[in-house]
Amino acid sequence: MGQIAPPEPESRLSFVTLTQFLASLPPGPNILYDADDRSLLRWVEPSELEDPTPYLLDGEFVLTAGLPFVGEGGSPERVDAYVRRLVGAKVCALGFGLTPYHDAVPAALVEACRKHRLTLVEVPPSVPFAAVGLAFAQLLESDSAKAFRQLAEANRQLMRAVLSRRPEHELLAALVQRVPSWAVLIGADGKVRARAGSAGLEASALGPLAARLLSGSGPRVEIETFDLPGARQVIGHPLRSARDDNLGALLIGGEDRLTPAQNSVVSAAVGLLELLARQRTSGSLAPGQLATALLLHPDRDGGGMSAALQDLLWQSLGAGRAGPVRVVQGVKVEAPAWPAGDSPVRELLQWRRLFDTKLVEMTGYGFAAVTRLKVDDGVLAEAEKLGWRLVVSEAVTAGKLPEAYRQVSALRARAAATRESLRIEELSWTATGLIGREAGSMLASRLFAPLEGLDEDRRQHLTEVLRAWLGHNGSWDATAKALGLHRNSVRRQISLAAELLGADLNDTQTRTDLWIGLQYLP
């Protein structure tokens, strides 16, 4: 049966299993019970709490010196309950450090770990907990570095394929070299355009999956399973235009689920195939859009900008030598000044003229461009007359284009909401400066809405105490001195504010949000 899956959030490229970690430990630790847990290990966490589970993520290795098992805590019932809670929190393993509380691992703990299948490791006094944590960090760092090197090389190979004479065929061939699978590229008409590897099943069997991809909308992944070798799992990715028209689909299949690193390679290939499809279907204006997308999007080439792309950049800008450039993004806030029927081509030509560049890409939100111009007030005024607002990056070198693109992307929503064009060079580089008055006021209104029921004097007093307390980093004495109040009065006011706001004031993120929100209160 087929199923549709939403796009997955970005996963880490590297991972360490508990088995790998136990094998990498320094000499000394002794595995008293091995549950043969092959799950991923997320972190190593020391804790002497009787119940550490509220503070744990799944997949952690918990270290304890045995303080929870001193006195009555060492009874078989309480030890069993402790282990049961760890297993319920999906802890990978428990490390027990000898001394100062215990000379040996309690027998009740060994029995409970066997009963609930939790790996138990005895850590001698000669091995500090810090050494165990360091071993995990070093293993994760080494594995991550290897994965990133492999991903960068894979992306460079995909880019070389895009620049070949048969880009679609060469790109699929490069993909199946890096990902153990076969691949089939379907055109918008449902016909096969290119293939690589042996699919192990008839092309007609892929028809229903391709039909779903070509008839749907938005970013998505379709999955189909077949009871055939080499096709246990077939994943389909749609290829879409900037306006969400279906331009084709990429189908890949294999025996096993792909790793996070392999999924990253597939995502890069999908992006490049979309660019090629857009070039093929958008006429003579497409090469400039393709070049713009390749230059601006950092996920297209893990190895940085090639010499060929740099040459393309300066040619498209009409420049004979390298120099500073800017990234511009435009969002439409008013009706266009020309008929909607011819707007795509006319818009593209308009921006090329206005920014004196061929590097313009039409996007779902508007457009992106690379220009040598400073984008002065006259250019901004002309764009705004047409119903657009612009976000303009600082002047950067060619290698910094992806970073400049990310900066202007982060401010695009603000330009649309405030209906004001923005130049990054003119912004105040503080949290409040970047958020802007409108977004900041929305944040303040949402955070402090629970105080609206209080009378004005009471509400103002509470916010003044909260502002002073946050401003003095939670110091009761300093806050009391600044406000001329007794420290116990400050404590009561802060407790009341936390209760009314439903906020955990021990949480750093909560404090930060409240502090920023206070800057925008009327």
Image (cartoon, grey):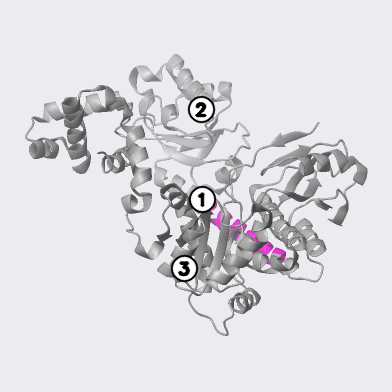
**Which quadrant of the figure contains the N terminus?**
top right
User: What element does badge 1 sit on?
Assistant: loop
Q: Which residue is mark 2?
A: 89
Which mark's residue is nearer the viewer, 2 or 1?
Answer: 1
Q: State which quadrant residue 353 falls in.
A: bottom right
In the image, farthest residue toward the left? 484
Name the residue type under label 1.
Answer: Glu
- Give the numbered dot on residue 334: 1
Which kind of residue does numbered mark 2 sit on?
A: Ala
| x 73%, y 47%: residue | 237
- Depth check: give the residue in front, 353 or 372: 353
Residue 494: percent from the left, percent from the top? Answer: 21, 29
Q: Is residue 506 above or below residue 146?
A: above
Q: Is residue 59 magenta?
A: no
Location of the C terminus (image quadrant): top left
Task: Decide which of tag 2 and tag 1 comes sooner along the chain.
Answer: 2
Mark closer to the chain start, 2 or 3: 2
Mark 2 or 3: the one toward you: 3
Instruction: Examine the image and state in which quarter residue 351 appears.
Output: bottom right
Q: Which mark is residue 379?
A: 3
Above-or-below relation of 414 to 351:
above
